Image: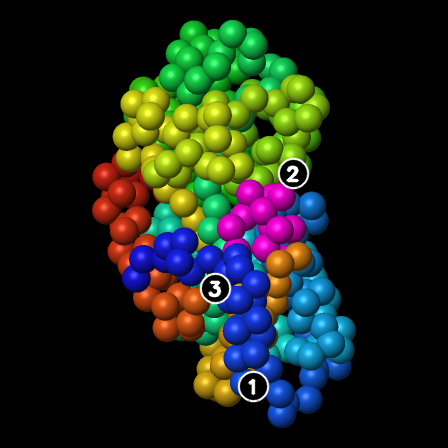
């Protein structure tokens, strides 16, 4: 499956149609007293923002109260592990970057969950690119990723970058940038991109690899510069920033999805109800516009499409990880 812009829910007509379908699918179901959206990342970041935007729109039809819980740690693994142990009745929904399900199995020798066994796909939620940014610790003369890598090679004490989690896609992409240029970039793992950005602003870390929306919101400070983006083409959220490929960097082109999933063994009726509710929420203009301010492009899918996407991305990353010999433990 290839998710393209035709999947984006950015017109009033699409919103109205999905709202109608959603209402039809679960009009007869009584709303839950409380439903929970679980994210493995800190408040203020893109994952948390997505959850809070959607939670507002799930009330009161899906749940009379829909709360967001930030169960941070272990690069998102704590949240996944928590959700897999919850009842599969639709009251607990995981929201996660797909890399936790597609890359982690290749870079961790042991995981406390099996993505193919412990979770039930509901829908893709949005797509986004990653950016590579530098802060006050890096000279203003550095204006591109190759220039940063050259500076890092000449200044090994400052050759570092932060990411939202060890083993996350931003960590993986940052490591690839260094490996491709034969530069030893030291990695600093954080519990989300926002803590990493705070250290970047304070000059405690030279660079940050993270979701583009987590970076662009700090540009107004004048202390942050985005040197490159990971998408196949320039991001509409940072149109003046060249892609990695434009800068001659190979094998680092990648976009990612956030997705919603239920615990394993959720019934078809529970999955259909959650899918319809999510599609309706993701189709609302205020949700679309709100996510765009964080560099997220709202999307949705069927459960089967998400399952296929996860399967194909898992297969995609296997030879790449093997080729570069990267493991989270290493």
Q: Which mark is residue 50?
A: none
Q: Which residue is at 45% across, 73% downward?
A: 120
Q: Is residue 323 above or below residue 88?
A: above
* Nearest to viewer (mark 1 / mark 2): 1
Q: CA distance from mark 1 to mark 2?
A: 39 Å
| Residue 29 on image: x %, y % | 63, 89
The percent position of residue 199, horizontal first and vertical second, equals: 66, 27
Identify the secondary structure beneath mark 3.
loop
Q: Which mark is residue 194?
A: 2
> Is 246 covered by the magenta stretch?
no
Q: Which residue: 68% across, 26% down?
A: 220
| Picture layout, residue 263 above or below residue 225 | below
Residue 254 on image: x %, y %: 37, 42
Residue corresponding to mark 3: 300
Residue range highlighted in magenta: 287-298
Calculate the distance from the C-alpha at mark 2 to the C-alpha at mark 3: 26 Å
Q: Earlier in the sequence, mark 3 or mark 1?
A: 1
Using a 10 Å C-alpha cutoff, classify the residue at mark 1 as few (fewer than 14 neighbours), some (14 to 19) or many (20 or more).
Answer: few
Q: Quadrant of residue 50?
A: bottom right
Q: Quadrant of the N terminus?
A: bottom left
First in sequence: mark 2 or mark 3?
A: 2
Which labelled disc corresponds to residue 24?
1
**Cα distance between the residues tagged 3 and 1:** 18 Å
Proximity of marks 1 and 2: CB atoms separated by less than 8 Å: no
């Amino acid at each position: 499956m290839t998710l393209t812009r035709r999947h984006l829910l950015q017109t009033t007509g699409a919103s109205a149609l999905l709202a109608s379908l959603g209402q039809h699918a679960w009009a007869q179901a009584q709303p839950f007293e409380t439903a929970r959206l679980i994210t493995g990342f800190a408040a203020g970041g893109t994952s948390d923002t997505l959850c809070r935007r959607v939670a507002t729109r799930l009330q009161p039809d899906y749940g009379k109260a829909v709360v967001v819980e930030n169960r941070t740690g272990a690069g998102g693994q704590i949240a996944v592990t928590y959700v897999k142990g919850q009842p599969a009745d639709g009251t607990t929904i995981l929201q996660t970057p797909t890399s936790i399900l597609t890359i982690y199995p290749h870079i961790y020798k042991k995981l406390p969950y099996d993505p193919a066994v412990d979770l039930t796909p509901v829908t893709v939620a949005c797509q986004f690119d990653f950016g590579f940014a530098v802060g006050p610790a890096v000279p203003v003369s550095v204006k591109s990723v190759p220039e940063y890598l050259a500076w890092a090679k000449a200044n090994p004490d400052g050759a570092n970058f932060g990411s939202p989690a060890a083993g996350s896609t931003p960590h993986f992409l940052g490591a690839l940038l260094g490996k491709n240029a034969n530069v030893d970039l030291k990695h600093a793992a954080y519990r989300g991109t926002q803590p990493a950005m705070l250290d970047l602003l304070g000059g405690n870390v030279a660079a940050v690899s993270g979701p583009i929306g987590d970076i662009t919101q700090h540009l107004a400070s004048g202390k942050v510069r985005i040197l490159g983006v990971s998408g196949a083409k320039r991001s509409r959220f940072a149109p003046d920033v060249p892609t990695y490929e434009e800068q001659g960097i190979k094998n680092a082109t990648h976009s990612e999805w956030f997705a919603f999933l239920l615990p394993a063994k959720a019934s078809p009726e529970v999955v259909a109800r959650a899918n319809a509710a999510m599609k309706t929420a993701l189709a609302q203009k205020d949700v679309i516009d709100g996510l765009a301010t964080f560099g997220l492009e709202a999307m949705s899918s069927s459960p089967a499409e998400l399952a296929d996407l996860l399967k194909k991305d898992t297969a995609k990353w296997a030879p790449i990880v093997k080729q570069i010999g990267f493991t989270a433990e290493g």
